[in-house]
Image: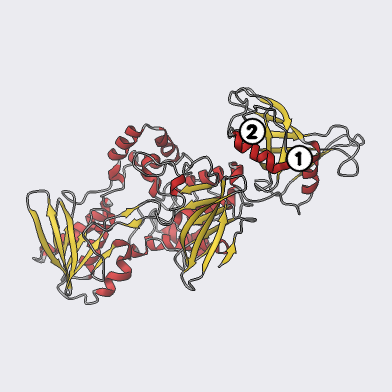
């Protein structure tokens, strides 16, 4: 076993999966925080996106403008239009007057973007375990992710301060149904089904279970490619229904409305989601329904009935029987239970989205769970954990109940990725890059902070009035991109600083005739975000770890503060020069 992303040099972000969600995250990380170290683990040998449903001619259900980044940053080099330009097809694409590209072309777009991040992706890496690692002070401040190389069988360990889970859904198979050569889920339809039924002229008996877009597309495919086959469509509802994609309903997928959904009460969320469910679930795009109906009608004109709809029905079992499948069907509309015999069955039954209990078995005891037993996810998509677990676990596509129907869709990817990256940048305890020692002026500025010992902290505070306070601050360079300042407030009453609020810390040694450069004094400005520490044991552990250089807190002090440095600048002053010279660290975000 070899270690990559060691505990001493962990990644800032480790993404599990490299589909649309984490590709959008890679873009956001590069554009918002390019100095953060990122790595992505993907089980497949390349970017794969619903390959089982890349049916010829199948189109996206959203505009090409809802790509991975356009709605967040139109100037990005990773937009769908930038892809068209790079492929030399932009004018031809515009000439199509088509807002919805084919699903096959969108897959090619994803691979084009993914190829530009090839250096930070490990393909054929199947994640087997995510484990929190305990620090010297007792906190769980680091993730260890174990993965297996599917090509060689080699086991590799990676360490990171933040894990972003985006492994997608797991195919949902109804109870009593066993998959096999003749029974496949829609996720594997194209890769398995046509190869198992190669005779396109035979009078096959097929069955499809489901009522959404996949069920409609698979039904059309079977009727179109097997001209003598009969298809049994097992529907849970009365009939196939059209998607409600009117512009008013679609406003739920706007960034502001999706964010507002999180602020609703739990009861209101459920009601809101139920009323808008037909924008996404159990529905088929209206234009495609028309095409399917025309195909069925043409069969009627020829005197054939090749589509048999079993409405109000569900599968009770499906098992291989010689060369075919025996299918149990129960109807709630009075027909009762009956059996179908088919040559093949396709399950268009959707996906289950949850954390894998085996993969996260060491993490689940530390997570805050809701009444439904699922992890509680904050507004910025971070899973809420016990206080001792300080490393960040973010999830994509697993929080529909609290973040709305768009949580599993493409529409909100640009905004969600921005939220996650921004949250990681703000969270000083979840960053892994120490202050870069090789950059110009960096060591001089660090030396000045250590020499001063105390800094003046300026913040907006919980109210609208600014707060200015001076207190001892020590730079802990073992954490954070550029280091984390730690101090203890000299007060026992409520802190005047706002948790997560922006701050400016100024280290000014005064008129001391020594210090860089050439004996001139230097004032250092540090910008960051405050994180309040109220746990006395944790404050004591910080003080003990920092040793003699640590700030001394008064007995009974209950509030410590941490400031993860986002920007560090040094201003050199001289009485011989009328103006100050300002230098900026190149690593600022």
Q: Nearer the viewer, residue 316 or 584?
A: 316
Q: Position of residue 513 (x, y in %)?
A: 91, 37
- Number of marks in the rendered image: 2
- Separation (CA) of disc 2 from disc 1: 17 Å
Q: In screen coordinates, is 490 left or right of 498? A: right
Camera-nearest label, 2 or 1: 1
* 192 or 162: nearer the viewer: 162
Q: Which residue is mark 2?
A: 560
Residue 569 appears left or right of 103: right
Query: Is 318 drawn above or below residue 544 in the view shown?
Result: below
Residue 200 in view in this figure? yes
Would you place residue 110 above or below residue 529 in this image?
A: below
Q: Position of residue 569 (x, y in %)?
A: 75, 41
Secondary-structure class at tag 1:
helix
Mark on residue 572?
none
Viewer-closest of 582 and 443: 443
What residue would you read off at disc 1?
Answer: 548
**Helix, strand or loop for disc 2:** strand
How many residues crowd around disc 1 within 10 Å: few (fewer than 14), some, or many (20 or more)? few
Residue that appears at 11% across and 62% down: 339
Q: Is residue 133 above or below residue 538?
A: below
Q: Nearer the viewer, residue 108 or 101?
A: 108
The spot of residue 455 in percent (x, y) is 74, 33
Closer to the N terminus: mark 2 or mark 1?
1
Q: Quadrant of residue 583?
A: top right
């Amino acid at each position: 076993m070899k270690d990559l992303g060691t505990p001493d040099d962990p990644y800032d972000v480790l993404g599990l999966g490299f589909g649309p969600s984490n590709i959008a995250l890679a873009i956001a990380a590069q554009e918002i925080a390019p100095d953060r170290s990122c790595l992505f683990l993907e089980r497949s040998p390349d970017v794969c996106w619903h390959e089982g449903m890349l049916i010829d001619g199948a189109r996206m259900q959203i505009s090409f403008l809802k790509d991975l980044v356009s709605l967040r940053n139109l100037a990005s080099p990773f937009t769908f239009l930038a892809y068209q330009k790079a492929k030399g097809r932009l004018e031809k694409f515009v000439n199509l007057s088509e807002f919805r590209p084919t699903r096959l072309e969108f897959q090619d777009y994803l691979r084009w973007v993914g190829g530009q991040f090839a250096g930070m992706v490990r393909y054929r890496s199947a994640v087997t375990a995510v484990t929190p690692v305990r620090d010297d002070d007792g906190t769980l401040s680091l993730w260890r992710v174990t993965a297996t190389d599917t090509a060689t069988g080699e086991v590799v360990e990676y360490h990171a301060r933040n894990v972003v889970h985006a492994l997608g859904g797991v195919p949902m198979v109804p109870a009593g149904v066993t998959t096999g050569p003749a029974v496949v889920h829609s996720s594997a339809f194209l890769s398995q089904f046509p190869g198992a039924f190669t005779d396109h002229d035979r009078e096959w008996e097929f069955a499809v279970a489901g009522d959404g877009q996949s069920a409609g597309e698979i039904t059309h495919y079977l009727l179109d490619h097997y001209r003598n086959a009969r298809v049994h469509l097992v529907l849970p509802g009365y009939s196939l229904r059209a998607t409600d994609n009117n512009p008013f309903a679609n406003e739920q997928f706007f960034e502001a409305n999706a964010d507002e959904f999180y602020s609703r009460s739990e009861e209101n969320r459920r009601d809101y989601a139920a009323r808008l469910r037909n924008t996404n679930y159990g529905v088929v795009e209206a234009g495609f329904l028309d095409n399917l109906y025309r195909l069925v009608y043409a069969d009627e004109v020829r005197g054939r009935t090749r589509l048999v709809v079993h409405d109000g029905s569900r599968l009770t079992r499906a098992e291989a029987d010689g060369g075919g499948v025996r299918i149990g069907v129960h109807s709630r509309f009075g027909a009762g239970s009956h059996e179908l015999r088919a040559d093949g069955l396709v399950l268009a039954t959707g996906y289950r989205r949850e954390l894998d209990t085996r993969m996260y078995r060491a993490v689940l005891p530390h997570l805050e769970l809701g009444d439904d037993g699922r992890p509680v996810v904050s507004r910025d998509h971070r899973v809420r954990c016990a206080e001792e677990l300080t490393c960040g676990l973010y999830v994509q596509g697993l929080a529909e109940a609290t973040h709305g129907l768009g949580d599993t869709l493409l529409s909100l990817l640009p905004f969600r990725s921005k939220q996650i990256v921004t949250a990681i940048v703000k969270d000083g305890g979840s960053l892994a890059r120490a202050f870069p020692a090789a950059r110009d002026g960096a060591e001089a500025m660090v030396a000045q902070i250590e020499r001063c010992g105390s800094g003046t902290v300026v913040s907006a505070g919980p109210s609208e009035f600014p707060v200015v306070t001076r207190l001892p601050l020590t730079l802990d360079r073992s954490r954070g991109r550029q280091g984390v300042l730690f101090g203890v407030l000299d007060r026992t009453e409520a802190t005047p600083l706002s948790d997560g609020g922006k701050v400016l810390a100024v280290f000014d040694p005064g008129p001391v005739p020594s210090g860089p450069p050439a004996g001139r004094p230097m004032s250092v400005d540090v910008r960051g975000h405050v994180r309040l520490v109220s746990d006395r044991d944790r404050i004591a552990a910080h003080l003990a770890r920092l040793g003699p250089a640590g700030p001394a807190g008064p007995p009974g002090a209950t509030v410590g503060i941490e400031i993860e440095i986002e920007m560090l600048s040094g201003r050199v002053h001289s009485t011989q020069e009328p103006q100050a010279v300002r230098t900026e660290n190149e690593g600022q975000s």
